[in-house]
């Protein structure tokens, strides 16, 4: 792929004045050849492979940053969902695998490792059940490991037995980690992509090569500046503006990703064109929606504005690269977006409105804090609702929910950095207990029969 000189110069301007960066370069590593029935052998194999393949990851990323003058905010790893190669293990052994990966992360200096994961949309093996049960204690014992559980797909339907477990899991993670911080590193998925470079949901899918490099871009500030510059134009002109801007930042993202892959000697995978906000003003998805014309995020029109943004980010990105993947769209994590936090504080943004917005964004209910006494069944029911949106729309949806103990609606849990400030949002007090305890599997919809 070739790049025009003026494209690079324009990107450099974006980095200086519009907070553009590459959110992550994520090296994916297969652990399938590390399988063993002996825990010590398995840990030794994992450590040897991860340290060998990822030893240059930070140094190469720094070299590419200096080469192009574009900051790479995070350097991450992802591995095969560990429930797959290590299905013979049980809870304590999975925790040992997690601590082994955590030690690798500390030595390598990477931000996070994703892949403490299970894919259980149609049922659970004994090993997958053990991994799920181990997540709270694993979170308490590690600092760099992220976990995800895929409980539904359009093809398989929704595994409600797994969904029922997820509510209790969120509560247990919250209880066992300071300020419920473990909840920030745990996500429940529907239609999880195998090449997602963003945590907490990153894992190296079973259809991926032995190793690959995926890049996740950022760029809300660039899009915000373009929308503001476009002024009071009609929607067709606005869509074209967003599309052209997404094209530019995707080209820059792939340029950086390919350079890191080439210098690392690994195959380039995909560029995830998701707009990932930060808690800094000017780097917010909600500010874009407000620039489009809604007074405050969550006001009537917000879902339509988000659809315009998400769709045209995808169109521009797909014109810029033949290898768009991951989730690709606009993230709406509440605590990680300054404007979303303000919307909650103002009262314009509720969980119910967020759920409506997830039908057109690229993920789901992300970094949403709820009162600490929220019943596990209510959390499971919220997860089921998000899965329903994902299954019926054949899209990825997810829930990353924080249920910090002893908090009530209106309280604040401040994590700092990219995780931001979580405002505890009120949740309906009407119960869903009987619904959740039915169990079984909600069958796949007719749109899943696409053969």
Image (spheres, grey):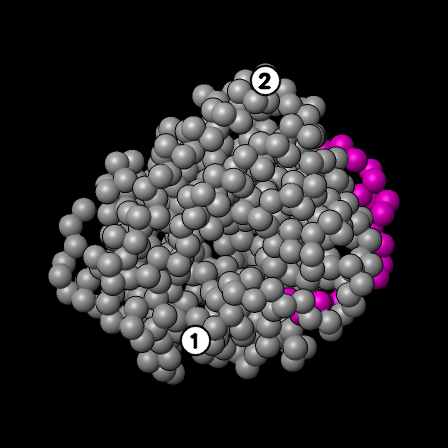
Q: Where is residue 249 shown, x and y percent of the image?
A: 30, 61
Which residue is under mark 1? 282
Q: Identify the mark at residue 38; answer none if there is no mark.
A: 2
Horizontal relation, residue 218 to residue 9: left or right? right
Horizontal relation, residue 393 to residue 323: left or right? right
- In which image quadrant can residue 129 be found? top right
Q: Report the front residue among 377 and 103.
A: 103
Q: Is residue 401 magenta?
A: no
Q: Which residues are magenta?
A: 422-451
- Which type of secondary structure does the marked residue at label 2 adopt? loop
Q: Where is residue 107 shown, x and y percent of the image?
A: 45, 43
- Which type of secondary structure does the marked residue at label 1 adopt? loop
**Residue visible at 45% across and 61% down in the picture:** 276
Q: Where is residue 158 shown, x and y percent of the image?
A: 67, 38
Residue 334 appears in the picture as rendered: no
User: For the residue carrying disc 1, how many other residues have a C-alpha within 10 Å: few (<14), some (14-19), or many (20+)?
Assistant: many
- Relative to residue 150, is residue 343 depicted above or below? below
**Residue visible at 43% across and 61% down in the picture:** 275
Cα distance between the residues tagged 2 and 1: 51 Å
**Residue visible at 33% across and 61% down in the picture:** 71
Horizontal relation, residue 195 to residue 173: left or right? left
Q: Is residue 431 magenta?
A: yes
- Relative to residue 247, is residue 59 depicted above or below? above
Horizontal relation, residue 151 to residue 33: left or right? right
Q: Report the front residue among 272 and 55.
A: 55
């Amino acid at each position: 792929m070739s790049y025009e000189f003026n494209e690079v110069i324009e990107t450099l301007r974006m980095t200086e004045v519009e907070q553009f960066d590459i959110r992550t370069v994520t090296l994916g590593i297969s652990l399938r050849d590390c399988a063993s029935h002996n825990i010590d052998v398995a840990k030794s194999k994992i450590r040897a492979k991860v340290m060998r393949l990822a030893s240059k990851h930070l140094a190469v990323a720094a070299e590419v940053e200096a080469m192009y003058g574009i900051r790479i905010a995070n350097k991450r790893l992802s591995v095969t969902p560990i429930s797959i190669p290590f299905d013979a293990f049980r809870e304590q052994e999975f925790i040992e695998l997690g601590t082994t990966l955590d030690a690798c992360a500390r030595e390598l200096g990477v931000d996070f490792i994703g892949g403490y994961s299970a894919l259980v949309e149609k049922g659970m093996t004994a090993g997958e059940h053990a991994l799920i049960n181990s997540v709270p204690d694993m979170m308490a014992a590690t600092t760099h490991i992220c976990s995800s559980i895929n409980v539904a797909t359009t093809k398989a339907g929704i595994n409600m037995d797994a969904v029922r477990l997820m509510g209790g899991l969120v509560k247990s993670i919250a209880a066992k980690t300071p300020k419920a911080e473990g909840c920030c590193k745990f996500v429940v998925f529907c239609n999880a992509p195998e090449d997602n470079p963003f945590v907490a949901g990153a894992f190296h899918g079973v259809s991926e090569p032995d190793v690959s490099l995926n890049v996740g871009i950022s760029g809300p500030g660039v899009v915000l500046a373009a929308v503001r510059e476009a002024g009071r134009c009609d929607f067709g002109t606005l869509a074209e503006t967003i599309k052209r801007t997404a094209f530019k930042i995707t080209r820059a993202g792939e340029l950086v990703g390919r350079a890191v892959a080439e210098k690392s000697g690994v195959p380039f995978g995909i560029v995830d064109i998701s707009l990932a906000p930060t808690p800094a003003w000017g780097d917010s998805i909600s500010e874009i929606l407000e620039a489009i014309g809604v007074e405050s995020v969550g006001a009537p029109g917000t879902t339509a504005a988000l659809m315009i943004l998400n769709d045209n980010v995808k169109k521009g990105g797909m014109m810029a690269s033949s290898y768009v993947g991951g989730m690709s769209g606009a993230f709406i994590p509440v605590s990680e977006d300054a404007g979303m936090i303000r919307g909650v504080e103002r009262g314009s943004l509720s969980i119910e409105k967020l759920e409506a917005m997830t039908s057109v964004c690229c993920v789901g209910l992300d970094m949403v804090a709820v009162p600490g006494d929220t019943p596990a069944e209510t959390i499971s029911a919220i997860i089921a609702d998000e899965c329903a949106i994902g299954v019926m729309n054949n899209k990825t949806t997810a829930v990353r929910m924080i249920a910090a103990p002893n908090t009530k609606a209106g309280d604040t849990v401040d994590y700092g950095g990219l995780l931001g400030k979580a405002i505890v949002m009120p949740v309906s007090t009407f119960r869903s207990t009987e619904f959740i305890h039915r169990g079984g599997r909600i069958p796949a919809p007719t749109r899943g029969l696409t053969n």
